[in-house]
Amino acid sequence: MENVKLFGTLPSPFSYRVIWVLELKGIKYDYIEEDLANKSSLLLQYNPVHKKIPVLVHNEKPICESLVILEYVEEIWPHQHPLLPKEPYERAMVRFWAKFADEKGIVIWILFRTTGEDQAKAKKECFNMLETLEEHGNLGTNTFFGGENVGLADLAVASVIHWLEVIEQVLEIKLFEGTTFPSLYNWFNNLKDVPIIKSNIPDQHQMFLSFKKQRETLMDSTAT
Ligand SMILES: N[C@@H](CCC(=O)N[C@@H](CS)C(=O)NCC(=O)O)C(=O)O
């Protein structure tokens, strides 16, 4: 009997990557909400290196780092909603875009935390990231990054784009627009229409209220 637990916080984009894969593959799991201001001894025990969520605990064995977790889940349950295409080159491409999202996606949090020149620089980097995904992601030909099914790269990129849209609202800016990035915009709408994603994606208005408060607190603390 499989025992699967997910330690996360909501609405962390990294937690959602794991929630989406477990839901897509139909794996039963218990979700444990962590308070990152007061981390549980279990979290510290399971992730002594980074002390971060998400952690997936499979039959008492912890796995850390969201992309590593996704690859692990794929290896353990390969037949239920495969996350990677069959052909090695296509698998490599999907991994390339997942890594790209992981490395470049961090810029949305820099955008969220900065003002002035630093924010202008982050905005430019964010625009460049979107432009690269638009130009090189092959989304004009494919519905999703790996072809016709939602896979590893889609989950990684969605955990940047969905959160970016909220950050844009808080900062009252607009970078991710359908007119500038038509293929990427279309891809995201297709992804949000996938029933499992649709019913497991955090509500952007709720996120907006919470992120707005966080931004105000941040600005107050840097002003003093
Ligand atoms: N690279 C990690 C990032 C995870 C991460 O940044 N988690 C944040 C919450 S969104 C965290 O646990 N922060 C707690 C801390 O830094 O102390 C992954 O992909 O899992």
Image (tube, rainbow, N blue to C red):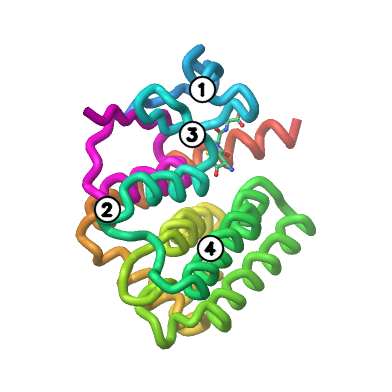
Q: Is residue 13 magenta?
A: yes
User: Ligand 1 within 8 A of label 3's CB?
Assistant: no
Magenta residue span = 1-30
Q: Which mark is residue 46?
A: 1
Q: CA distance from mark 2 to mark 1?
A: 25 Å
Looking at the rendered structure, the kind of residue marked 2 is Leu
Residue 208 can be seen in this image? no
> Quarter of the image containing the C terminus?
top right
Which structural element holds mark 2? helix
Which structural element holds mark 4? helix
Q: Nearer the viewer, residue 14 or 172?
A: 14
In the orientation shown, which residue stands out farthest toward the bottom?
Answer: 141
Quickly name the residue at label 2.
24
Quickly name the residue at label 3.
63
**Badge 2 local density, few (<14 within 10 Å), some, or many (20+)?**
many
Mark closer to the chain start, 2 or 1? 2
Which residue is located at x 73 percent, y 63 percent? Answer: 120
Which residue is located at x 32 percent, y 60 percent? Answer: 82
Looking at the rendered structure, the kind of residue marked 3 is Ile
